[in-house]
Amino acid sequence: MSVDPKTLVRTFYSITDAIAAGTAPATALDEVLAESLVVHLPDGSSVDREGFRAVGRAFAQGFPGSVHTVEDLIAEGDRVVARLSWRGTHSGEFQSAPPTGTVITLAESGIMRVEGDRIVEFWPLFDSLTLMMGVGIAKI
């Protein structure tokens, strides 16, 4: 059964936020992510579904209770483009950086390719400099 691609993407972000809040396990994403998922990272590398779950666990540990606010969703064919903001408090270890208590807000966007009722590809992009400065890894 096929679902509306924009609804699927909204559900993806809702589940991601539930994982960060500790109200859902990382495997809850299996509801919307294909087993064959490929996430294309900005540096040209890619991760599979398990690799993406690991990234989600790292963010949930470092920023428990973080939330996404979907600003725009644009769908055409099998692709959905999302523009959103992400907000979290660095209250846990993240990439070896001890908690700073810093509240971080990032601009984020992504393109997802959908087949049926699953996301099969994802091209995320977010303001990693602001993130790294907020956790004390980068300085200007």
Image (cartoon, rainbow, N blue to C red):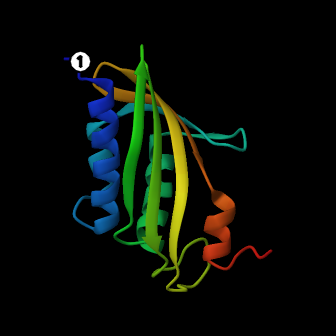
Q: Residue furthest right?
A: 140
42 or 54, which is in the foreground? Answer: 42
The vertical placement of 140 against 34, above or below, is below
The location of residue 122, given as percent across then percent down, is 51, 34
Q: Which of the pair 11/82 is nearer the observer?
A: 82
**Which image quarter is the N terminus in?**
top left
Relative side of 25 to 120, left or right: left
Q: Which residue is drawn at 72% across and 44% down?
A: 43
Q: Residue furthest left?
A: 1
| Tag 1: amino acid | Ser
The x and y percentages for residue 135 are: 61, 77
Name the quadrant containing residue 114.
top left
Q: In this view, does 59 lie above or below 84?
A: below
In what element is the residue under mark 1? Answer: loop
Q: Residue at x 46, y 54 (%)?
A: 85
User: Mark 1, residues whose alpha carbon is within 10 Å: few (<14), some, or many (≥20)?
Assistant: few
> In the figure, is residue 49 to the left or right of 14?
right
State the image coordinates of residue 22 (x, y, percent, origin top left): 27, 68
Is residue 85 found left or right of 26 in the rendered image?
right
Q: Which residue sits furthest top?
A: 77
User: Which residue shows up at 46% across the image and 58% down it?
Assistant: 86
Above or below, 61 relative to 32? below
Q: Name the residue under label 1.
A: 2
Given residues 53 and 16, the one toward you in this image is 16
Q: Where is residue 15 in the image (x, y as percent from the top left)?
A: 28, 50
Quarter that holds the C terminus: bottom right
Q: Which residue sits at x=48%, y=48%?
A: 52
